[in-house]
Amino acid sequence: MTIYPVSSDAFRPYGRVVEGYDTSAILEALKKTPLPAGTVYTPREDSLHEAVGADKVGEGLFGGMPFQLGYCNGHNTKLNCLEFHRDSEFNLGTEDFILLLAKQSEIINGRLDTSVVKAFRVPAGTLVEVYATTLHYAPCHTDPAKGFQVLVALPEGTNTDFRPGDGANTMDRMLWARNKWLLAHADSTEATEGAVVGLTGENTDIAGDL
C-alpha cells in the first residue's frame, strides 16, 4: 500500500497541515501519557488542557467553540473501523504516525469498500486537520519500538457515551457515541460489540508496508 506524506497533493481532499501554533508544551504533556501494547483512547486529558498555550491553540482551532484535548496512543497497523464526526478533528504526534483515510462520499448504500482507503504519514510534531467529511480511526505506528502518542482534539463531548441503538435510517444506526458515526469491519472487536458492519473487502493492514 502506498503511504503518502501529508505534504502531498493527495492529502488535500482529506485534510490539511496546520501551521503557526506553538504546540511544544502540548507535545511535552503528550509524551507523559500512557503508551500501551494495544491502543487506548481518552477523549479529554487534563494535563493536555493545562499545557502552556493549549487554551489559545484550542480557541484558534475551533473558533471559540468548547473543545476537548485527548489522546489515542499505542501500537496498531490495522484499519478495523472508520468513523466520522460532524466537525474536523486535529491530530499531533510525538513520533511519526500513519492515518488510514477515506471520504464520506465513498459510502454507498451504507457500505464502504476498503480498497478506496489511502494511507498518509504525519511527521512528528506536525499538526493536521482531518476534515469532517473524512473517515478515519485509530492511528498506525511507523516504528513498533516507538508506537504512537497522538493528540485528538475535537469539539467538547465528542466520543462520549451516547448510543441510542435505533434510528430512522442506516446512518442513524451507525451512531456509536456522541458525535461519532462508525463503520466496522467484520473482523473488528467493535463488530462483535454490535457496531454496524459497513466495511467490505480486506481489513487493511499496513504492517508489510512499513
Image (cartoon, rainbow, N blue to C red):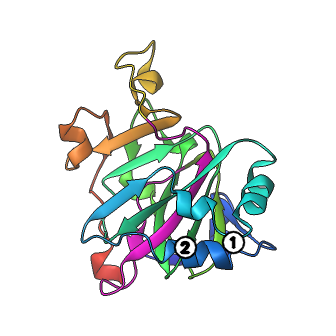
Q: Is residue 138 magenta?
A: yes
What's the CA distance linking mark 1 and mark 2? Answer: 31 Å
Sequence-first tag of 1 and 2 = 1
Quick check: 106 left or right of 53? Answer: left
Residue 153 on the magenta segment: yes
User: Height in image: 74 above or below 155?
Assistant: below
Which dot marks residue 29? Answer: 2
Identified at 75% across, 62% down, the residue is 57
Residue at the image position 62 percent from the left and 37 percent from the top = 86
Q: Amino acid at mark 2?
A: Ala
Tell me the SS state at disc 2: helix
Residue shown at 24% from the left, 32% from the top? 194
Depth check, front residue: 22 or 171? 22
What residue lies at 74% left-to-right and 68% top-to-bottom? 53
Q: Quadrant of the C terminus?
A: bottom left
Between 72 and 86, the one lying in front of the other is 72
Query: Badge 2: how crowded within 10 Å, few (<14), some, or many (20+)?
Result: some
Residue 150 at x, y percent in the picture: 49, 68
Residue furthest top in the image? 168
Answer whether labels 1 and 2 touch (C-beta < 8 Å): no
> How far across and down, in percent of the image, does residue 34 sit?
36, 69
The answer to whether residue 6 is visible is no
Question: Disc 1 marks which residue?
Answer: 9
Say which mark, if any, is on residue 85: none
Where is residue 158 drawn, in percent x and y?
A: 53, 40
Q: Quadrant of the N terminus?
A: bottom left
Q: In the image, is residue 14 above or below residue 64?
A: below
Tell me if mark 1 has few (under 14), some (14-19) or many (20+) residues whose alpha carbon lies within 10 angstroms of its own.
few
Tell me where the magenta segment starts and ends, as one range.
135-160
Query: 91 or 57, which is in the foreground?
Result: 57
Q: Amino acid at mark 1?
A: Asp
**Vertical comparison of 107 with 76: above or below:** above
